[in-house]
Image (cartoon, rainbow, N blue to C red):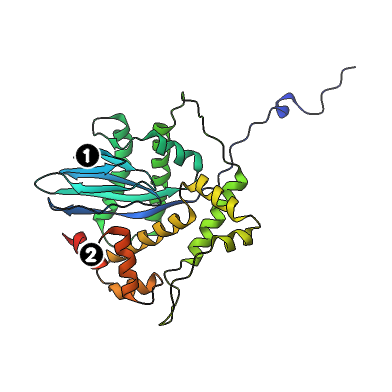
Amino acid sequence: MNRPPAYPDWQHDVQWLPAIDWNVKLFGGHEQQVGRDWAMPPESHIGFEIILILAGSQETVMGGRRYIAKEGDILLIPPGISHVNRCHSADGMRYFCTHFNVDDPHLRQEMIKHNRVVFEQATPENASLRPILDQWLAMVRRGGGHATEDRFQLQIGLFELLGKLAQTALPADKPTTHDPVAPASVQYAKAIAEAMKANFNPHAPFGEHDEAPVFRIDRIAASLGISTGYALEVFRKVYGLSPRQYLSELKLHEAKVLIQQPDLSLKAIAERLGYAHLSHFSRQFKRWTGMSPLQYRKRQDE
């Protein structure tokens, strides 16, 4: 007499969905009208920058190449890449811009290697991305506070945007040749990033003679039970930047966001960023951008 197997055959070939543990962040966004002489100093970001040209045209210089984006075009600037944006039209320019980040190393690496910067208006890729950006732009133009529902819609749109970009950078018929990053390495890199963010607290109280907290990768590595060299290696592999570069970009991005809030004095901004004196913050900001915080604020108002 034949006995049935202990388990049905289908149970011996179980397929699993992948586990997802991403840190995905949207750094806000804004619409701006600028004049013909508008230009930003060389800069780079910890995340991706995506720009929708609403009127006029923009010139972007990056990696020794010059790109022109016209009305309706979308630009995607990878993280950690120094670039310069300037108005390219005689009548000025209007644009919508936002920054986002995802710590999935495969997606980041492939999107950077793909090197697709301008998605022209008539292309299918532009058509797939434009509705998401239009939805965010409508939220900006609506003004006022944003409800919890709006924040969920923003997050949904961000995941949809990442999915569309992944289709562009990782077509289904293109074999991947990346070296896989071990899950443990990703977790260590995330832990280092979170430790840096905790160390850099814009709202921490500082005394009159205090300085900004000193970043020590060796201490963070020791707290995780790994060597400093390994900590540096896994962090760069996941984020594409050294920990010190990441922290510098984090501070710079926070500074730019705060400077664009006209109700905040520059002294208050310096204090939020952990600087005991405005002069210390001003010198550091000029090293970052080539201009003082006051000059940067005035440039944003042009």
User: Can residue 73 be seen?
Assistant: no
Q: Secondary structure at mark 1?
A: strand
Which sits in the foreground, 59 or 19? Answer: 59
N-term mark: 1 or 2: 1
Q: Amino acid at mark 1?
A: Ala
Residue designated by label 1: 69
Q: Residue furthest top?
A: 1
Residue at 55 percent of width and 48 percent of height: 233
7 above or below 182? above
Q: Quadrant of residue 127?
A: top left
Residue at 45 percent of width and 68 percent of height: 201
Residue 265 disc label: none
In screen coordinates, is 103 left or right of 38?
Answer: right
Q: Point out the image quarter for the C terminus.
A: bottom left
Quick one: label 2, few (<14), some, or many (20+) residues within 10 Å? Answer: some
Q: Residue 119 appears at what percent x and percent y?
A: 28, 35
Quick one: label 1, few (<14), some, or many (20+) residues within 10 Å? Answer: many
11 above or below 96? above
62 above or below 230? above
Residue at 67 percent of width and 31 percent of height: 14
Q: Secondary structure at mark 2?
A: helix
Q: Residue 255 appears at what percent x and percent y?
A: 34, 64
Which sits in the foreground, 105 or 237? Answer: 237
Q: Residue 160 appears at what percent x and percent y?
A: 41, 41
Residue designated by label 2: 297
